[in-house]
Image: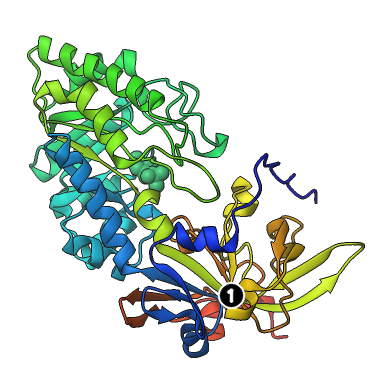
């Protein structure tokens, strides 16, 4: 199988010191090496093993507050609905619940998860292009805050289910504003050819029909144009301006509207991207939608969770190929699939203090899975890393553990939450017994 071509970068990779300096929860201790908040990573590795996801509670709080404050300072009445698909650990959800976060979910399973994490359905938005009837019924029974419908077909299903339950479903329509967020093709959602939302030109007609349906309470308009948006605010502003026009049209038809959902997608710095800061997003919302006098909401996932997590892993061995050095880790693409799936760049730091300052030379950092695409980094400057050395893959808090699989019969990695000097295992490593649990062989196949 062909390996994905590595993305050519025009600028040199950030140094270890630069990677640490740009991430407030990380520090390099002279004796303990790389630390997350007040906890040395070697302590976690010794107790919990590797590979292990390590999340910083302080970073989750700091980033949630930065978003909430930017929206408030822009004069907006705004809710932050954390997009749970980025990281659905109960402990992560509880940290954010205690900050006052709402949630954005894309399945009945995620709705159940957020409620277990402490975010009630009454603060949760249900998005997604194909909600099943069972999921819609469950959400309505739980008292969902808002269902984002993506088609007339879906609105009709919601109407029928709501009527059967004797309720009015609070429905916003997700519109596709046909803007190009200029992000990776696999994570852009707001162009006309994408499967998401209904064409904005059809939205008024749908909204009008919704207002006449006995099981529907039309409450607003939603949009979400893509993920890892780092190219500035132009696409956001264009999308929100189109949404504002739609809101004016809805009002001109004397139809009710209670709020606007501005979606998520704000990018983060993995390498040297310069994503717009929360103040820029808040400003774009304020200038385009602020004049409507409606509450707004945003649905950030990656921006809150991504920088808060890392994947702690050990070197299995180093091997020399033809003029290449391969550092083989005990983490693989089944744990963190972003490099294989999106050609994503993740910072990689050694943990031991001596390795952080040792001379480095180019190496390919890879996992042990039997796929050519199981590569975390090509030609990355790395010190000598003998077997057993610890390495951290940075910015893995979003779309990390949630996208893990057990491919190659590799158990799901452990998860740890750090908060100041304290830390705890929030999900133990999957055991081999759990990996096989639930399987059976039909009798008629016969004994082995
Ligand atoms: C995935 C998703 C989000 C979150 O996207 P991020 O890039 O993680 O901020 C928000 N809203 C919807 C509808 C989504 O599908």
In the depicted structure, whether residue 347 falls above or below residue 196: below
**Quadrant assignment, res 370:** bottom right
* Residue assigned mark 1: 313
Q: Is mark 1 within 8 Å of ligand 1?
A: no
Task: Tell me the colour scheme of the image.
Answer: rainbow
Q: Nearer the viewer, residue 400 or 167?
A: 400
Which image quarter holds the C terminus?
Answer: bottom right
Task: Classify 97 as above or below 205.
Answer: below
Q: Farthest residue toward the bottom?
A: 47
Viewer-side residue, 197 vs 365: 365
Rendered residue at 35%/61% (across/down): 88
Rendered location of residue 382, percent (x, y): 70, 66
The x and y percentages for residue 121 are 17, 54
For the question of whether residue 141 can be seen, the reply is no
Q: Is residue 445 visible?
A: yes
Where 98 falls versus 306 (above or below)?
below
Residue sitting nearer the eye, 140 or 43 = 43
Which residue is located at x 51 percent, y 34 percent? 183
Q: How many marks?
A: 1
Q: Is residue 373 left or right of residue 45?
A: right
Q: Circle 1 — which element?
A: strand
Q: Where's residue 311, x and y in %?
A: 52, 69
Q: Residue at image x 46%, y 41%?
A: 228
Tell me: residue 319, above or below residue 149: below
Residue at the extreme right of the image, as rendered: 322
Quarter holding ligand 1: top left
Indicate the position of residue 87 as horizontal and vertical percent values: 38, 59
Q: Quadrant of residue 305?
A: bottom left
């Amino acid at each position: 199988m062909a390996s994905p071509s590595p993305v050519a970068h025009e600028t040199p990779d950030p140094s270890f010191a630069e990677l640490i300096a740009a991430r407030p929860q990380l520090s390099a201790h002279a004796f303990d090496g790389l630390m997350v908040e007040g906890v040395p990573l070697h302590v976690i590795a010794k107790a919990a093993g590797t590979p292990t996801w390590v999340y910083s509670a302080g970073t989750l709080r700091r980033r949630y507050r930065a978003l909430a404050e930017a929206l408030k300072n822009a004069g907006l009445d705004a809710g932050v609905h954390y997009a749970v698909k980025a990281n659905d650990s109960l402990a992560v959800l509880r940290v954010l619940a205690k900050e006052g976060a709402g949630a954005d979910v894309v399945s009945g399973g995620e709705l159940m998860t957020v409620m277990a994490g402490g975010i009630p359905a009454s603060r949760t938005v249900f998005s997604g292009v194909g909600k099943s009837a069972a999921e819609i019924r469950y959400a309505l029974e739980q008292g969902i805050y808002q269902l984002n419908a993506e088609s007339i077909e879906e609105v009709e299903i919601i109407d029928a289910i709501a009527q059967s339950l004797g309720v009015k479903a609070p429905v916003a329509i997700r519109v596709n504003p046909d803007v190009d967020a200029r992000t990776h093709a696999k994570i852009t959602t707001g162009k006309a050819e994408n499967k998401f939302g209904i064409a904005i030109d059809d939205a008024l007609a749908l909204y009008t029909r919704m207002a006449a349906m006995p099981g529907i309470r039309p409450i607003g308009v939603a949009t979400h144009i893509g993920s890892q948006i780092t190219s500035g605010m132009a696409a956001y502003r264009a999308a929100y301006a189109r949404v504002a026009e739609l809101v004016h049209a809805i009002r001109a038809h004397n139809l009710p509207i209670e709020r606007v959902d501005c979606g998520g997608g704000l990018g983060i710095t993995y390498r040297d991207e310069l994503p717009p800061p929360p103040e820029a997003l808040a400003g774009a919302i304020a200038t385009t939608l602020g004049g409507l006098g409606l509450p707004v909401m945003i649905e950030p996932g990656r921006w809150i969770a991504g920088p808060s997590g890392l994947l702690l892993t050990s070197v299995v061995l180093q091997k020399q190929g033809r003029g290449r050095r391969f550092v083989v880790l005990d983490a693989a693409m089944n744990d963190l699939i972003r490099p294989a799936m999106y050609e994503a760049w993740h910072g990689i730091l050694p943990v031991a203090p001596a390795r952080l300052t040792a001379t480095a030379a180019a190496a390919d950092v890879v996992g042990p899975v039997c796929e050519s695409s199981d590569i975390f980094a090509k030609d990355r400057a790395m010190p000598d890393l003998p077997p057993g050395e610890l390495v951290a893959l940075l910015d893995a808090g979003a779309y990390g553990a949630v996208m893990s699989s057990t491919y190659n019969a590799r158990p799901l990695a452990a998860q740890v939450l750090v908060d100041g000097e304290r830390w705890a295992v929030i999900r133990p490593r999957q055991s081999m017994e759990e990996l096989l649990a639930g399987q059976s062989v039909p009798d008629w196949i016969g004994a082995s």
